[in-house]
Image (tube, rainbow, N blue to C red):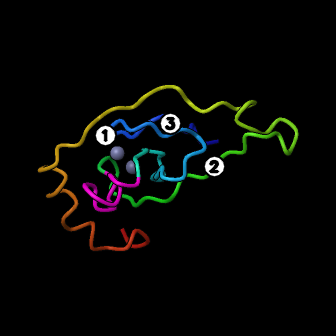
């Protein structure tokens, strides 16, 4: 089950569980769309993997026990702004590879 972290790790933008611009890597490092596509160039600064849109957990309990009311999103903020220069060199060789080949 995803943690659904509350904010962008780089710019600290709020990313509520029902927002459509949260992006995650396979480890659930969480960024806003602007950071994922912009400064990060589609490369997770923590693992080198790519990003996908974070799925939205339903607010309404359509199936018993499954909703944000039953499994609330994390309120633990992860705020680790990337070193932009360091990320540029880290991502240089990775960003040109499709995530499937990294
Ligand atoms: Zn951001
Ligand atoms: Zn990652």
Foreground pick, 35 / 102? 35
Residue beneath the point at 48% across and 45% down: 28
| Residue at position x 47%, y 47% in the image | 27
Residue 36 painted magenta: yes
Q: How far apart are the two marked residues, 3 and 2, measured between alpha carbons?
A: 12 Å
The residue carrying mark 1 is 11
Q: Earlier in the sequence, mark 1 or mark 2?
A: 1
Return the mark for residue 77: none
> Residue 36, located in which quarter of the rendered image?
bottom left
What residue appears at the point 54 percent right and 38 percent down from the top-left corner?
Answer: 16
The mark found on residue 5 in the picture is: 3
- The answer to whether residue 66 is left or right of residue 79 is right
Residue highlighted by disc 2: 56
Question: Mark 2 falls on what kind of element?
Answer: loop
- Please name which of the two marks, 3 or 1, marks the residue nearer to the observer: 1
For the record, the magenta segment spans 33-44
Distance from label 1 to label 2 (Cα)?
Answer: 21 Å
**Which mark is first along the chain, 1 or 3?**
3
Decide which of tag 3 and tag 2 comes sooner along the chain: 3
* Left or right: residue 77 compared with residue 74: left
Report the front residue among 37 and 95.
37
Tag 1's secondary structure? loop
State which quarter of the image contains the N terminus: top right
């Amino acid at each position: 089950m995803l943690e659904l972290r509350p904010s962008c790790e780089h710019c600290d933008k709020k990313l509520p569980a029902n927002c459509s611009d949260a992006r995650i890597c396979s480890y659930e490092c969480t960024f806003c769309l602007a950071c994922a596509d912009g400064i990060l160039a589609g490369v997770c600064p923590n693992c080198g993997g790519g990003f996908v849109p974070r799925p939205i957990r339903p607010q309404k309990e359509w199936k018993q026990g499954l909703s944000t009311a039953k499994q609330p999103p994390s309120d633990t903020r992860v705020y680790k702004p990337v070193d932009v220069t360091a990320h540029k060199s880290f991502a240089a060789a990775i960003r040109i590879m499709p995530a499937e080949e990294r």
